[in-house]
Image (spheres, rainbow, N blue to C red):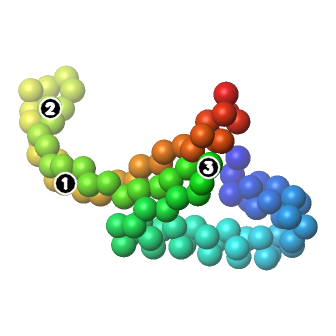
Amino acid sequence: MRKNDFIAKVAQKSGLSKKDTEAVIEASLDTITQALKDRESVSFIGFGSFQAVKKNAREITIPGTTKKVEVPSKYGVRFKAGKILKEAVE
């Protein structure tokens, strides 16, 4: 499902216009993004949680060669599905 499809379905279920729904979704995504940039976790009870996690620097070997490359440390995003979401997907 693409973003436009998602907006259309949420608008239909909520009774809001597509324009209003898009504004709400954009604001929600911006808020989640900013929280993760600030290294805060974002939790939705039953749905899941987003967390910024630090990945340590490491040395990897490029497949098919013996060349080793240093990968610097960086932050990534981890999503952990909640119980209700897990049960719905099963």
Q: Residue at x 53, y 73 (%)?
A: 31
Between residue 86 and residue 31, name the one nearer to us. Answer: 86
Q: Is residue 68 left or right of residue 64?
A: left
Between residue 44 and residue 31, name the one nearer to us. Answer: 44
For badge 3, the amino acid type reads Phe
Q: Mark 3 sits on what residue?
A: 47
Q: Residue at x 86, y 64 (%)?
A: 14
- For the residues carrying marks 1 and 2, which lies nearer the camera in this image? 1
Residue 66's x, y, as percent?
9, 26
**Disc assigned to residue 61:** 2
For badge 2, the amino acid type reads Thr
Q: Quadrant of the C terminus?
A: top right
- For the residues carrying marks 3 and 1, which lies nearer the camera in this image? 3
* Badge 1 density bin: few <14, some 14–19, many ≥20, Cα 10 Å: few
In which image quadrant can residue 12 be found? bottom right
Q: Is residue 14 left or right of residue 42?
A: right
Kind of element beneath mark 1: loop
C-beta proximity under 8 Å, tags 3 and 1? no
In which image quadrant can residue 69 be found? top left
